[in-house]
Image (cartoon, rainbow, N blue to C red):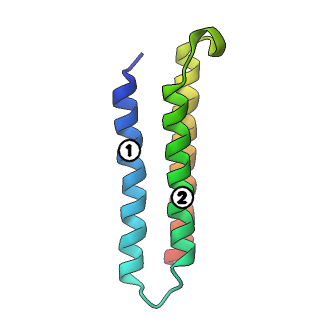
Amino acid sequence: MASKKNLKKDIEYLISDVVFDCYALMDEHPEKDFSAYEEIINDIIVVKEDLVERINHFDPGVHGNSRNYFMAIKRDLITSITEAYDNLTKLGA
């Protein structure tokens, strides 16, 4: 299993990338309503907190196979990032 520390770093990097892109679009389009961008930022931060909490509270006795558990976290991360960028694309158009 890859280290939890590296997985947390990957989560932090990808989430911050989405947040920075939101702020960049807000800067490029000051005439638009920022509430949609802020909603994307808030949603992605909630996802980050949830994923980190799941990593920190792994218990082999409860969750079983660590490989499957952490693969599910990675899948959820990729799904959330993709969804956030899809929403950003809709707003940027």
**Is mark 2 in CB contact (under 8 Å) with mark 1?**
no
For residue 50, which quarter of the picture? Answer: top right
> Residue at 55% of width from left, 61% of height from top?
86
Q: Nearer the viewer, mark 2 or mark 1?
A: 1
- Which residue position is annotated with label 2? 84
Percent position (x, y) of residue 13?
35, 46
Instruction: Report the quarter where the N terminus lies.
Output: top left
Packing grade of label 1 (10 A; few <14, some 14-19, many >=20) is: some
Percent position (x, y) of residue 59?
57, 15
> Residue at 58% of width from left, 22% of height from top?
69
Q: CA distance from mark 2 to mark 1?
A: 15 Å
- Which residue position is annotated with label 1? 12
Packing grade of label 2 (10 A; few <14, some 14-19, many >=20) is: many
For residue 2, which quarter of the picture? Answer: top left
Type of residue at label 1? Glu
Type of residue at label 2? Ala
Percent position (x, y) of residue 41?
50, 62
